[in-house]
Image (cartoon, helix red, strand yellow):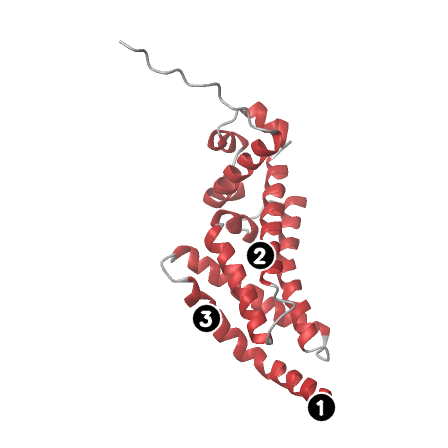
Amino acid sequence: MASAPQAGPRRRLTKQARRALILKAAEAVFGEVGYHGATMELVAVRSGVTRSLLYEHFSSLDDLYVACVHAARAELHSRFVDASIFNQGHPRDQLRAGIEAYFRFVQEHGPSWDVLSGTGSLPAGPAGELAAELRFRAADQIAALAEKVVPDLDPDEVRAYAHIVSGGGEQLARWWRRNPGVPLDDVVERLMTVVWDGLSGFVDSAVEQGTSSAG
């Protein structure tokens, strides 16, 4: 009777690949139980590594949380860049492209978004402060777009509108995470309906002025 073939040696992961595996597991843990429900032991079990190996990559739960936030923020930022929301089309199309990029990230990387948005309570100290600061940067991107379109608008007013858009998008994303059956296009259109009605007056005026100046 022939013996069963022997499995080959398991391929050893590189340090970078192991770190990525741990981050993915940590995002899932933070997304499910929040920062205060997470432990290094739980992340180690989820990622399939020993606790000692986990500590070789991350010195503490705060260190791991900050790394997750940075990774999520970098991915979301790349989505905005890829959508080219600062460079093309009518302002309405630019805004829609940015909103769609945001919600596509939520759809494809739900646990990452949960970490970035602070689902559940945030940690105290530097880790929590960093998470809050990075959440503000989405509003900064929206403000930068608005300043290009309506440069004569007061900067503080622009930032206020940007935070309204950002906060509304974040809350809608929380609702969508609980109602994942709603199509992406419907979610994007619902935010656009609310946001564009408020901003279109400023934008249309700026576009008209730009057309008159060009003439």
Q: Is residue 67 left or right of residue 172?
A: right
Q: Quadrant of residue 7?
A: top left
> Is residue 215 visible in the rendered structure shown here?
yes
Neighbours of disc 1 within 10 Å: few (<14), some (14-19), many (20+): few
Q: Is 110 situated above or below 202?
A: above
Residue at point 53%, 35% (across, down): 21
User: Are the residues at dot 1 and dot 3 in contact (C-beta closer than 8 Å)?
Assistant: no
Label 3: which residue?
189
Q: Which element is circle 1 on?
A: loop
Q: Quadrant of residue 20?
A: top right
Indicate the position of residue 85 as horizontal and vertical percent values: 61, 66
Circle 1 residue: 215
Residue depth check, mark 1 versus mark 3: number of the one nearer the observer: 1
Q: Position of residue 141 (x, y in %)?
A: 65, 63
Residue type at numbered disc 3: Glu
Using a 10 Å C-alpha cutoff, classify the residue at mark 3 as few (fewer than 14 neighbours), some (14 to 19) or many (20 or more).
some
Of the image marks 1 and 3, the number of the one nearer the N terminus: 3
Work out whether mark 1 precedes mark 2 in sequence or the reverse, and give the earlier one. Answer: 2
Q: Secondary structure at mark 2?
A: helix
Which part of the image, by quadrant, shows the C terminus?
Answer: bottom right
The amino acid sitting under disc 1 is Gly
- Tell which residue pokes out farthest to the front in this image: 2
Q: Quadrant of residue 61?
A: top right
Mark 3 residue element: helix
The numbered disc on residue 172 is none
